[in-house]
C-alpha cells in the first residue's frame, strides 16, 4: 500500500501536519483517529461474527391436540 513512500515523504508529511494543526492539536487528532479506527475494526468484527453465526433452528410446531367436539345436551329418556 505504501510502497512508494520513503522516509523523506513521511517526514515532509509530518512537517506539513505540524504546520497546519500545531503541536498541541496533533496528539488530540492522533488519539481521535486511533479511537475511530478501533471502533471501525470492532464494528467490522461484530458484523463478521453476526454473518458467520449459524442461524438458530425454527421453533418446533405447537403440539396439536385433537379437536374437542361441540358439546351437545344429553338426550335422556323423556316421557312424552
Image (cartoon, rainbow, N blue to C red):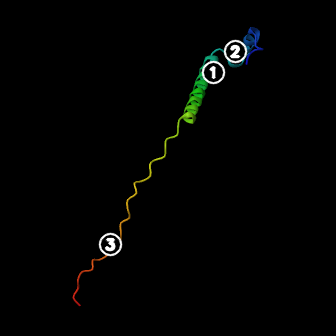
Q: Give the labeled residue for mark 1.
A: 29
Kindly identify the residue that appears in the image at 63 percent across and 21 percent down: 29
Badge 2: few (under 14), some or many (20 or more) residues near its Cα, within 10 Å?
Answer: some
Of mark 3 and mark 1, the one earlier in the sequence is 1
Q: Earlier in the sequence, mark 2 or mark 3?
A: 2
Check residue 52 in the rendering and tell me which mark sits there, or answer none.
none
Q: Residue furthest front?
A: 77
In the rendered image of this protein, does residue 51 appear above or below residue 21?
Answer: below
| 47 is higher (above) or lower (below) than 14 | below
Quadrant where the image shows the C terminus? bottom left
Front residue of this view, candidates 25 and 67 = 67
Mark 3 and mark 1: Cα distance apart in space: 79 Å
| Horizontal relation, residue 42 to residue 19: left or right | left
Q: CA distance from mark 2 to mark 3?
A: 90 Å
Considering the numbered disc 3 on the image, is that residue within a helix, a strand or a loop? loop
The image's mark for residue 71 is 3
Of marks 3 and 1, the one in the foreground? 3
Q: Name the one closer to the observer, 8 or 4.
A: 4
Q: Which residue is mark 2?
A: 18
Helix, strand, or loop for circle 1? helix
Amino acid at each position: 500500500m505504501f510502497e512508494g513512500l520513503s522516509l523523506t515523504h513521511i517526514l515532509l508529511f509530518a512537517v506539513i501536519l505540524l504546520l497546519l494543526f500545531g503541536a498541541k492539536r496533533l496528539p488530540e487528532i492522533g488519539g481521535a483517529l486511533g479511537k475511530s479506527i478501533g471502533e471501525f475494526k470492532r464494528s467490522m468484527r461484530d458484523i463478521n461474527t453476526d454473518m458467520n453465526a449459524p442461524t438458530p433452528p425454527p421453533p418446533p410446531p405447537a403440539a396439536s391436540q385433537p379437536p374437542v367436539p361441540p358439546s351437545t345436551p344429553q338426550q335422556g329418556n323423556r316421557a312424552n
